[in-house]
Amino acid sequence: MEITRRLLLAMTGLAAAGQAQAQREAEAGWPSRPITLVVPNPPGGGTDFAARLFQEALGQALGQPVVIENRSGGNGNVGILAAARAKPDGYTLLLQYSGYHGANAALTPDVGWDPNRDLAAVGMATLAPHVIFSGPGIPVRSLAELVAHIRENPGRVTYASAGTGSIQNIAGLQLAQRVGAPMLHVPYRGAAPALQDVVGGRVDIFITTPSSAMSLLQGGQLKALAVASEARLSALPEVPTTAEAGLPDYTVDAWFAVFAPAGTPQPVIEKVNAALREATRNPRVQEVATASGVVLKPLTAAEMDSMARQDVETLTRVVREAGLRLE
């Protein structure tokens, strides 16, 4: 009996060692086939833009094609859940949006995924400062005029968002708090229809990332009143920051970052992180990012994890204080 027990233990140890060796070899040879990058939104908009901005350069850095898979629905939850439940082998990654990452679990009962438990931060793709845009439906030409108009018309100035609980929704709530007068929230299913109604004069303002609004701005259909960030954008050098325009301490920055299913081997995460950082040095990526008003901000996986956890804490608090809910 003792000899049999020792033999079984030895065989178990050999099997475990063999599995560990096979795992190390698999990680060393990763990637050996195309990688799927899940985008939890339809084509168009900031998340899809960030994915396509990095697609080619990231594939070149990793030595395998990166295939974008748009899986929209449920305020991003359909695609996020699919990525979180994927095999944690590095062949399925997620291009995550900070609004979804920080707020969805607080917004939706039984959302099915936990941002801190089910996803592993890999690295930043882009940081997107938000701009306060106004349409022809409101008679303002500057941020100071907008603030005065909101105060003179409490509850009557309308602001669009890409949905309840989105960064745009939260940005509008925070602007109203900062100004000291309420505004009326008008939610849409995405940035594109929201922009259409702002341009059409049916909604007054939209606080969003510039990448989805640049063509409308250049066509004179929108006005950019202020950049809600610490620095001006090179794509909009004439547009002041909110602090410069008289509204300090009001910033709205969104990020778009790569995450992996929890349990993905750390060496794989580090390989993708290194590839992301290499991609930010690609001249074509830099050119398109600058023209679109987004910022390339390479971070380590640990730095990205810290930023993401902080945003989960902050946005969860804002959502709960405002009583926002998605059923």
Image (cartoon, rainbow, N blue to C red):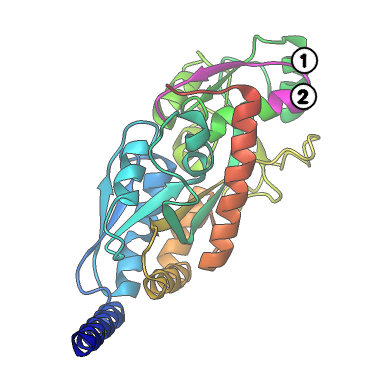
Circle 2 packing at 10 Å, graded few (<14), some (14-19), many (20+), is some
Looking at the rendered image, the quarter that the N terminus falls into is bottom left
Front-lying residue, 282 or 95: 95
Give the vertical position of 206 relative to 64 (above or below).
above
Image quadrant where residue 17 sits: bottom left
188 on left or right of 169? left
Q: Is residue 264 above or below residue 168?
A: below
Q: Quadrant of residue 223?
A: top right
**SS label for mark 2:** helix
Residue 205 on image: x %, y %: 58, 23
Indicate the position of residue 187 as horizontal and vertical percent values: 48, 20
Q: Secondary structure at mark 1?
A: helix
Kind of residue at badge 2: Val
Instruction: Report the quarter where the C terminus lies.
Output: top left
Question: Quick check: is 229 in the magenta stretch?
Answer: no
The verdict on residue 179 being magenta is yes
Disc number placed over residue 117 in the picture, else none: none
| Location of mark 1 (residue) | 151
Q: Is residue 81 visible?
A: yes
**Residue sitting at 67 percent across and 49 percent down?**
232
On screen, residue 63 versus residue 244, left or right, reads left
Is 260 left or right of 314, judged from the image as shown? Answer: left
Taking the spot 46% from the left edge, 19% from the top edge, the residue there is 197
Mark 1 and 2 residues: CB-CB less than 8 Å, in contact? yes
Q: Which residue lies under the disc numbered 2?
A: 179
Write the residue at 30% across / 68% down.
Answer: 59
| Left or right of residue 33: residue 167 | right
The region drawn magenta spans 175-190
Percent position of residue 129, x then y = 59, 45
